[in-house]
Image: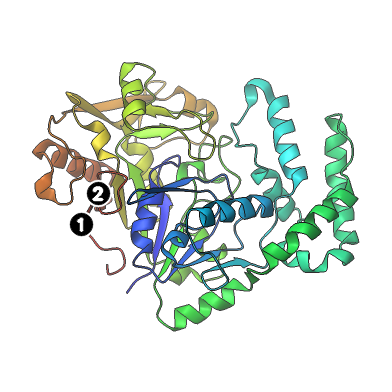
C-alpha cells in the first residue's frame, strides 16, 4: 500500500477538500504540511457541511490528523475552528489530533503587518487573505519566530522577543503604528498556551512509528502549485512551497514517503485575488461558470475569477510537482455548454509558447491559443462510472489527460463524497 500526497495543480480551490475527505476515509493518518488558515476546504458528508481552514480534512472522519512543522499556526484560529467542529459533533482529542512542537506561530503582529502592507500597496496589492501567513513565514526564515514549543517556556522568552520586536517595531514605526505591546502579547500567549500544548509533540517521531507499522499516510497540501513561492505566478503567490516535495520537509518524513502524488484539477480554471490569468473570461460564459460552480472562496468569501481549462498551466504544474495522476473535479459545471474550450498554448509577442513564462510582464502579456470541442447536453452530476457519462464528456476528459501528459485517476462529479469515478486507486497504485 502506498502513501498519497495531494496537491492542487492550479491556483487552489480545485476541490481538494472533497477528494482528501474521500481518501481520508481509507487512510490511517492525514498530515497538513504547509500553509496556514488561509487554506479553505469544504466537506459535504451526508446532510452536514464542514468548513475547514487549518485542521486536516481527516479530522471529520476521526482519522489521526497531524499539523506538520511546515504549517504556520494561528493558535486562536485553531481554537475557534476546533470549537466550531465540536459544535457539529466532531470529536477532537489527543488521540486523533496532534501538532508539531516545532511549528511556528502566527501572532497578532503578523496579522497587523499583513493588513498594513496590503493597504499601503494600493494598486500593487498581492491579494493576501490578511491572516498573517506571509509575515509569519518571514519570521521563521529570519530565525526570530516563536514556535509551539516556546509556549511551554514563556517566562524565558525575553531574548526571542527582543529579536522579534526589534524587527516588527521598526516596521510598525514606518507605518506610523505603536510598538508591539510585549506584556499584552505574553498575556495572550499564556492564556492560549494550555489549549495548544495539549496537542503538541514531536510529530516526526509519531510519523516514523506509524510508518514502521505500515500505516497509510495521506499528505494534504494547501493552495495550489501555481501559488508556490518558487514556481508560481510570482509575486502573486503564497509564502510557502506548495509542491509535493514539501510533504517531506513539512512533516519530518523523508522524501521516499510521498508515494502517489495526486494533483487536483478543476475541469475549468479559477483564481481568487490579484495576478495574471490567461484564460479568464469576463463575459457571460465566465459568469455562468462562476454561478454554476458556486465560486466563492471558502476562507475569504471573495468571488473567484473564472475561465476555460488551461492545459499549459496544468501540464507545467504536474511536471514540477511530480504528479502521478490527477483528480478532475467539477466536471458537472460544464454540463449544457454547446462548446467548450481548452488552452493548448500561448502567443507572446509573435512567438508560440508551450509553457508559462516566469516574468510577471510576460505572464500578463500572453494570449491563449484555444482548441474548441463540442460540449454535452446530458448531465454528469452524480456519475459514479464511465457508463454514467455522456460520450462527449468522456472525450473531453481524454483530451485533457493527453494535453497535460498525466493520466486521470479520479473524476469528481458533485460535492458528495461517493459521487466519484475511480480510475486508478492512489493507495494501491
> In the rendered image, which quarter contains the N terminus?
bottom left
Judging from the image, the colouring scheme is rainbow
Residue 375 point in image, percent of width and height: 16, 29
Residue 204, quarter of picture: bottom right
The residue lying toward the viewer, choosing from 389 and 269, is 389
Horizontal side of 43 relative to 156 (left or right) equals: left
Horizontal side of 402 relative to 72 (left or right) equals: left
Horizontal side of 65 relative to 157 (left or right) equals: left
Q: Is residue 72 visible?
A: no
Q: How many marks?
A: 2
**Are discs 2 and 1 less than 8 Å apart at CB?**
yes
Which comes sooner in the sequence, label 2 or label 1? 2
Which residue is identified by label 1? 423
Query: Relative to 93, is 331 above or below?
Result: above
- Label 2 to label 1, Cα distance in Å? 8 Å
The residue lying toward the viewer, choosing from 159 and 300, is 300
Residue shown at the point (39%, 43%) measured from the top left: 14
Residue shown at the point (39%, 56%) measured from the top left: 20
Which residue is identified by label 2? 411
Amino acid at each position: 500500500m502506498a502513501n498519497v500526497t495531494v496537491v492542487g495543480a492550479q491556483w487552489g480551490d480545485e476541490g481538494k477538500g472533497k477528494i482528501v475527505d474521500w481518501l481520508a476515509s481509507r487512510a490511517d493518518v492525514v498530515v497538513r504540511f504547509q500553509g496556514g488558515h488561509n487554506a479553505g476546504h469544504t466537506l459535504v458528508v451526508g446532510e452536514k457541511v464542514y468548513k475547514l481552514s487549518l485542521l486536516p480534512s481527516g479530522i471529520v472522519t476521526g482519522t489521526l490528523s497531524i499539523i506538520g512543522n511546515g504549517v504556520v499556526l494561528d493558535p486562536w484560529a485553531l481554537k475557534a475552528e476546533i470549537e466550531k467542529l465540536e459544535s457539529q459533533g466532531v470529536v477532537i482529542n489527543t488521540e486523533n489530533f496532534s501538532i508539531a512542537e516545532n511549528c511556528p506561530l502566527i501572532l497578532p503582529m503578523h496579522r497587523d503587518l499583513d493588513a498594513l502592507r496590503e493597504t499601503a500597496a494600493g494598486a500593487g496589492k498581492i491579494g493576501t487573505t490578511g491572516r498573517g501567513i506571509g509575515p509569519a513565514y518571514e519570521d521563521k526564515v529570519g530565525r526570530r519566530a516563536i514556535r509551539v514549543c516556546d509556549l511551554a517556556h514563556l517566562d524565558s522568552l525575553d531574548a526571542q522577543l527582543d529579536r522579534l520586536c526589534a524587527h516588527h517595531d521598526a516596521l510598525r514605526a514606518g507605518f506610523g503604528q505603536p510598538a508591539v505591546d510585549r506584556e499584552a502579547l505574553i498575556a495572550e500567549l499564556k492564556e492560549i498556551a494550555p489549549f495548544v500544548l495539549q496537542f503538541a509533540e514531536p510529530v516526526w517521531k509519531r510519523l516514523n512509528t506509524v510508518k514502521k507499522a505500515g500505516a497509510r499516510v495521506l499528505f494534504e497540501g494547501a493552495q495550489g502549485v501555481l501559488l508556490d513561492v518558487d514556481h508560481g505566478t510570482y509575486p502573486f503567490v503564497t509564502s510557502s512551497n506548495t509542491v509535493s516535495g514539501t510533504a517531506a520537509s513539512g512533516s519530518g518524513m523523508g522524501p521516499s514517503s510521498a508515494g502517489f502524488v495526486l494533483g487536483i484539477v478543476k475541469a475549468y480554471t479559477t483564481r481568487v485575488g490579484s495576478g495574471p490569468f490567461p484564460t479568464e473570461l469576463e463575459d457571460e460564459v465566465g459568469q455562468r461558470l462562476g454561478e454554476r460552480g458556486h465560486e466563492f472562496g471558502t476562507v475569504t468569501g471573495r468571488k473567484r475569477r473564472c475561465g476555460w481549462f488551461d492545459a499549459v498551466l496544468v501540464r507545467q504544474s504536474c511536471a514540477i510537482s511530480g504528479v502521478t495522476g490527477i483528480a478532475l473535479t467539477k466536471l458537472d459545471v460544464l454540463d449544457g455548454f454547446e462548446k467548450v474550450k481548452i488552452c493548448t498554448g500561448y502567443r507572446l509577442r509573435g512567438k508560440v509558447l508551450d509553457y508559462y513564462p516566469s516574468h510577471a510582464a510576460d505572464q500578463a502579456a500572453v494570449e491563449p491559443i484555444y482548441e474548441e470541442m463540442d460540449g454535452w447536453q446530458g448531465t454528469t452530476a452524480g456519475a459514479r462510472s464511465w457508463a454514467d457519462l455522456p460520450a462527449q464528456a468522456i472525450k473531453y476528459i481524454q483530451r485533457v489527460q493527453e494535453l497535460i501528459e498525466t493520466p486521470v485517476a479520479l473524476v469528481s462529479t458533485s460535492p458528495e463524497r461517493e459521487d466519484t469515478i475511480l480510475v486508478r486507486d492512489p493507495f494501491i497504485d
